[in-house]
Image (spheres, helix red, strand yellow):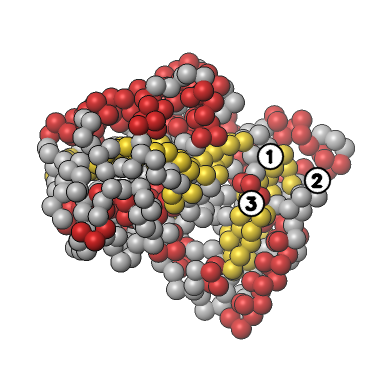
Amino acid sequence: MTDSRVLCIGLDAACFEQLSPLIEAGELEHLPALFDRGTAGTLTTTTPPWTPSAWQSITTGTTPWTHGIYDFYDYTGTAPHLVSATDLQVPYLWEYLDAAGHKSIVVNVPVTHPVHQISGSIVPGYLAPESAEVLIDGEVSDQSTLNDTYRIYARDRTDRTARIDENERLIRSRVAAAETLAGRHDWSFMMVQFQRTDSIFHTMGHDEEAVRRVYQTVDEAVGTLLELVGDETTVLVVSDHGIHEYDGIFRCNTWLRDRGWVQTSGDAERYSWGETTKPTATDETGSTAVSHRLVGAGLSVFQRLGLTPQRTERALRFVGLADPVRKRLPDELLIDSMAHVDWGASQAYCRSVSSLGIRCNVEGREPDGVVPSADFDGVRTQLIEALRAVRGPDGTAVFEDVYDRHERHGSDVANEASAPDIVVCPTEMRWKVTDVVREPMFDATTEFSHTYDGLFAAAGPSIVTDAPGNVHATDIAPTILALFGHRPAPVMEGEVPAELLSVNEASLHPAPTPGARYYPSDTDTEPSAAVTDRLSEMGYLE
């Protein structure tokens, strides 16, 4: 038996750590009912557990070491750029299905811009530029074809109620897009992703009502989608990672600097997210951005005079005034005016707040390499031993695992220039590991960020209701291929979870072979600065 239709609902950052209290309080209707009529459990995500890398593991059945997306930025060119579909080194799930004659509808899945040719429809999600082109029934169209008000990212709203309303509007717009596309052409596979279940924690995570309303709106959206597809459709609910409140900050490049591995420069450029760099972070008069630019310009003048933020902060901390002064200035303006990693002069560095790894600056590999290739193995060993020994202020280990990528995953990995050499896994994902060179090395935080434990649920004609519900992110694409009668593609690293499907494995056919990916319109993506201007609620705030 194979299924004629499959719906995959993506809930970014959804996890039972956050969902269970809402379910127990009776705040949700459709998700718990779906869990009860099928199977549900934990989805273990990839390393690192970030949106760009994890969703690609879900939609390709491969780890970042194979699909090539590790972070928000790709470093294979002459300058870092935001990742896009052009950086993905393996086929998407819907490309396999398209090769087998199955039409797909894909709505709001991250890193699907620029749209690529399939016989169905693609509406790009996270990391695409606002107003990115969409694909409708195989034809490129303007985003406005869906709806004049359709947006990828939230508009900035300073009023709390308006911010919550904007989240709810975006959620409902994803359902409306799916309904529109389902009315335009037949389909076999539909995937609809909701990003706001993640963004609400990054931006309003301590506002219990805001979180509840977003999850209730998503729950209503799930109910609408289930009604749209009917009872005979197999439904999967997946998340790319979990989320919870972090306890501490470890400034990795400060640690590396103090040990001589990192050199800094006031002229160095840092590639990371920042709310104050975005026009969407202003009110309608633009006053927020103007004031931030003025303060930032003043800080830059002080730096040219030798009064760097590091020196100022050390002095203020000595007399007990660092925290009060810091609270008066936007954090990112302090960061933007600081000296950052001098990439060419440093031996090893943490590239970004979302890298969870160390890259070594090796001669013959990096453009300005300084570590002799003969010393590369020894440098990695030395750094790994030192990182494993790092203890926080309370004496507990900052990392539960630190390992050598070359030993565990190999040296010849996809998009190798973007891959870390050393991977760090914070203890219980309670530590934010940041690239900012700043005092103090350790700091406290109450912000929310990602964990390795996401969510998986499935229900439908081919789902065994009492099957174990625990899966890996790379198992999702093979499972969906099996529902359509195909074995996992040779490149896939995941597998169909044992006893999950009532499908005769012996009857499965080899996976279809997609052709080369074709982009029917211009593959040039919007410059990184312009894209980040539109990510008004990224949540990666350093």
Kindly identify the residue that appears in the image at 37 percent across and 58 percent down.
495
Question: Would residue 218 be visible to someone looking at this image?
Answer: no
Q: Quadrant of residue 173?
A: top left
Spatial CA distance of label 1 from label 3 is 11 Å
Amino acid identity at mark 3: Pro
Secondary structure of residue under mark 1 = loop
Regarding residue 100, the answer to whether it shows in the image is yes
Total marks in image: 3
Residue 435's x, y, as percent? 62, 52
Q: Which mark is residue 394?
A: 2
132 sits to left or right of 73: left
When the figure is inspected, residue 91 is found, relative to residue 395, above or below; the finding is below
Q: Residues within 10 Å of mark 2 (few under 14, many from 20)?
A: few
**Observer-nearest of 228 and 358:** 228
Amino acid carrying label 2: it is Asp
Indicate the quadrant containing the C terminus: top left, top right, bottom left or bottom right.
top right
Return the mark for residue 485. Answer: none
Q: Of all residues shown, which one is farthest toward the front?
A: 466
* Disc 1: which residue: 247
**Mark 1 nearby-residue class (10 Å; few <14, some 14–19, many ≥20):** some
